[in-house]
Image (cartoon, helix red, strand yellow):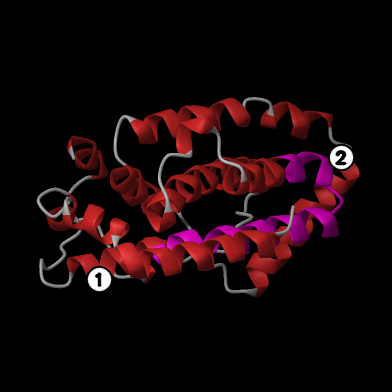
């Protein structure tokens, strides 16, 4: 499955959004809940949130490439690539549970599921090796995306993710120690060379919580 196919799908969805504005309309409906929590001005809130959604979706193929390259370079394909393949499959061939929406508003569902999957894999790598695998912290962005997708549907997507990663820890346990140690060493070297910064995706877009994240559940 090609990453370029994902990028083509995103490009087509962006064109659909320009014509039907479904995602923009959905974001406008959140103005009494999500906008105040992020400190957004009502006049520019939709513009900021649409930019967030667009970048959030576009990061999916980028993160897929990062994980593929890191896994192949460090010979831990057997652990990482199955989850990369799951992300591709989710995005290109969504299950009936997430296939109902069209355009960018539909891809937000798929992107949220993929980013949550990446987050779980990244956390496992970080807990075991001391450094993250992904170049950006998406935890706050995922909470915002959860609110945009909406409950209870976002919770159903979370459940799919947890089901998918249920065997992740055992995959690390069965991996030969030499390639795993080499991966952790290379990953640590890259982070130390890069100044050990781990920027927040949401903060880079100017979206910061004004209240505790748990209040997003009330939206």
The residue sitting at 31% across, 57% down in the picture is: 23
The residue sitting at 68% across, 26% down in the picture is: 167
* Range of residues picked out in magenta: 54-82
Q: Which mark is residue 174?
A: none
Mark 1–mark 2 distance (CA, rounded to whole Å) = 48 Å
* Residue under numbered circle 2: 177
Q: Secondary structure at mark 1?
A: helix
The residue sitting at 58% across, 48% down in the picture is: 91
User: Is residue 172 on the magenta stretch?
Assistant: no
* Residue under numbered circle 1: 47
Is the residue 140 above or below the residue 61 in the image?
A: above
The spot of residue 183 in percent (x, y) is 79, 53
Q: Nearer the viewer, mark 1 or mark 2?
A: 1
Query: Image check: 137 left or right of 70?
Result: left
Residue 198 can be seen in this image: no
User: Is residue 68 on the magenta stretch?
Assistant: yes
Residue contact between numbered discs 1 and 2, judged by CB atoms under 8 Å:
no
């Amino acid at each position: 499955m090609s990453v370029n196919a994902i990028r083509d799908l995103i490009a087509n969805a962006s064109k659909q959004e320009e014509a039907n504005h479904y995602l923009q309309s959905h974001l406008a409906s959140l103005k009494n809940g999500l906008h105040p929590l992020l400190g957004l001005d009502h006049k520019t809130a939709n513009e900021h949130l649409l930019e967030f959604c667009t970048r959030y979706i576009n990061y999916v193929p980028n993160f897929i490439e990062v994980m593929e390259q890191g896994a192949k370079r460090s010979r831990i394909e057997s652990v990482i690539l199955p989850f990369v393949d799951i992300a591709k499959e989710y995005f290109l061939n969504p299950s009936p549970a997430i296939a109902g929406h069209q355009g960018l508003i539909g891809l937000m569902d798929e992107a949220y599921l993929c980013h949550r999957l990446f987050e779980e894999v990244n956390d496992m790598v970080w807990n075991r090796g001391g450094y993250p695998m992904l170049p950006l912290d998406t935890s706050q962005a995922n909470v915002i995306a959860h609110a945009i997708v909406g409950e209870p549907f976002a919770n159903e997507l979370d459940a799919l993710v947890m089901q998918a990663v249920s065997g992740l820890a055992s995959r690390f346990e069965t991996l030969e120690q030499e390639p795993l140690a080499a991966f952790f060493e290379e990953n640590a070297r890259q982070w130390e060379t890069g100044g050990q910064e781990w920027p927040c995706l949401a903060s880079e877009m100017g979206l910061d919580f004004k209240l505790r994240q748990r209040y997003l559940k009330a939206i």
